[in-house]
């Protein structure tokens, strides 16, 4: 039997210029008892035109978030939650404007405002006890699918794992392709490739199914137009395509599972702090044994867009670091089961994983 029963984003606005409707959308959620909105905004926008267009009211909180360093941490969420409650009480909503980092911070903060204790204790599936506050996601870089997924990925003291449950999903998202136009070229490529890899992995494995494939095929087509088509590159029309591809890719993986690249990627990110999408590119580049066609096409995209993917990294890694990465990877049993089958432990050895890391 297959049973896939997931909560979707409650409302999804799409269209160039939709960001201008944010004020109206939030107005419905402001009540006399609780009217404060918390705006969490990628600090790239500090002093930019978008910052002038935030529909804030007196008493709202605006927090600019640096997303260029470490990925979101449990301690960061706990601190932010405490600060919001102390200064504002329970807000009417949280709005995350940025990439996967800021959107995950918004999702996690919305949940932690109503759930006691540290976010560390909620890393996992369905551990959250109460619905969070109303939360809105507005992507400004496309590819991770964080705008549509039911997880808020956090790095804690012992693991990198999401707060995953129905309540994590955004109540509202706004997909406005204008917002991603300023993304630096490398980030545009690495983050976009996360979608490409989500689709290749979700569609190549034991859990693949028609529902997941339907979204996956369309997302792959869109990625091909954006990165390989006659008019490849960061054009306004491609911004629209990439934004939709990210959303569809997220749904494709939700209804199936990610595979080998993501399993190895969590190891790399955990040990070296390598950012998710960049790590995936480094890894996917050496996975031709598992995804021959996908990797060949990925390499073509790298060439066509003249993007640098680091190689020969492993020569600087110690055995201890590699063993730790293997531990982290090995524990992602659901990904291996999808990629290799129920008997994956008979098909895979720690040495094979080590050999893959050594190719990077
Ligand atoms: P990001 O949020 O990490 O941002 C990447 C860079 O792009 C940052 O330097 C940021 O300042 C910049 N940026 C963002 N928008 C911009 C714009 N419009 N113009 C100029 N610069 C801009 O990017 P990401 O790759 O979307 O997110 C990665 C994070 O997403 C990781 O923390 C990862 O764990 C998480 N993730 C979450 C999910 C999920 O389902 N929740 C899935 C995959 C990855
Ligand atoms: Zn991913």
Image (spheres, rainbow, N blue to C red):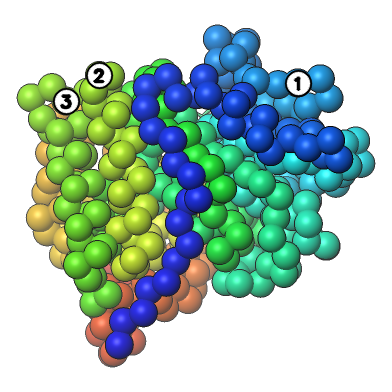
The residue carrying pointer 2 sits among few (fewer than 14), some (14 to 19) or many (20 or more) residues within 10 Å by Cα, namely few
Rendered image: mark on residue 232: 3
Marks 3 and 1, the one that precedes in the sequence:
1
Q: Is residue 297 visible?
A: yes
In the picture of the structure, the residue carrying the numbered disc 1 is 57
Horizontal side, residue 290 vs residue 11: left or right: left
Identity of the residue furthest to the right in this view:
86
Rendered image: mark on residue 235: 2
Q: Nearer the viewer, residue 79 or 35?
A: 35
Q: Nearer the viewer, residue 195 or 288?
A: 195
Name the quarter where the N terminus is drawn. Answer: bottom left
Residue 126 image position (x, y, % from top left): 61, 72
Find out whether the residues at labels 3 and 1 contact each other: C-beta distance under 8 Å: no
Q: Is residue 2 above or below residue 156?
A: below
Find out whether the residues at labels 1 and 2 contact each other: C-beta distance under 8 Å: no
Residue 26 image position (x, y, % from top left): 64, 32
Q: Of the residues tagged 1 and 2, which is closer to the observer? A: 1
The residue carrying pointer 3 sits among few (fewer than 14), some (14 to 19) or many (20 or more) residues within 10 Å by Cα, namely some
Horizontal side, residue 270 vs residue 283: left or right: right
Q: Secondary structure at mark 3?
A: loop
Residue at the (67%, 30%) spot, across then down: 27
Rendered image: mark on residue 217: none
Marks 1 and 2, the one that precedes in the sequence:
1
């Amino acid at each position: 039997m297959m049973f896939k029963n997931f909560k979707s984003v409650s409302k999804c606005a799409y269209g160039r210029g939709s960001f201008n409707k944010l004020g109206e959308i939030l107005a419905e959620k402001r009540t006399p008892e609780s009217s404060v909105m918390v705006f969490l905004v990628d600090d790239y926008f500090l002093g930019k035109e978008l910052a002038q267009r935030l529909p804030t009211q007196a008493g709202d909180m605006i927090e600019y978030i640096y997303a260029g360093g470490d990925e979101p941490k449990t301690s960061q969420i706990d601190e932010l939650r405490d600060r919001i409650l102390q200064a504002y009480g329970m807000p009417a909503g949280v709005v995350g404007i940025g990439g996967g980092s800021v959107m995950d911070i918004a999702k996690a903060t919305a949940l932690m405002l109503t759930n006691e204790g540290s976010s560390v204790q909620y890393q996992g599936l369905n551990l959250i006890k109460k619905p969070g506050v109303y939360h809105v996601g507005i992507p400004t870089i496309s590819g991770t699918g964080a705008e549509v997924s039911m997880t808020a990925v956090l790095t804690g003291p012992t693991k990198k794992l999401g707060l995953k449950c129905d309540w994590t999903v955004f109540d509202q998202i706004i997909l406005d392709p204008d917002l991603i136009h300023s993304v630096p070229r490398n980030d545009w490529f690495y983050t976009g490739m996360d979608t490409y890899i989500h689709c290749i992995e979700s569609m190549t494995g034991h859990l693949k199914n028609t529902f997941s494939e339907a979204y996956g095929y369309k997302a792959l087509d869109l990625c091909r137009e954006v990165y390989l088509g006659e008019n490849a590159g960061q054009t306004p029309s491609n911004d629209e395509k990439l934004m939709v591809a990210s959303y569809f890719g997220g749904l494709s993986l939700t209804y199936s599972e990610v595979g080998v690249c993501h399993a190895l990627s969590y190891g790399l990110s955990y040990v070296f702090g390598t950012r998710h999408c960049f790590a995936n590119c480094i890894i996917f580049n050496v996975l031709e044994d598992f995804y021959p066609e996908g990797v060949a096409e990925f390499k073509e995209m790298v060439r066509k867009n003249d993007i640098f993917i680091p190689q020969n990294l492993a020569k600087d890694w110690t055995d201890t670091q590699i063993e730790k990465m293997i531990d982290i990877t090995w524990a992602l049993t659901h990904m291996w089961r999808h990629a290799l089958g129920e008997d994956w432990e008979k098909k895979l050895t720690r040495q094979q994983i080590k050999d893959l890391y050594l190719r990077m």
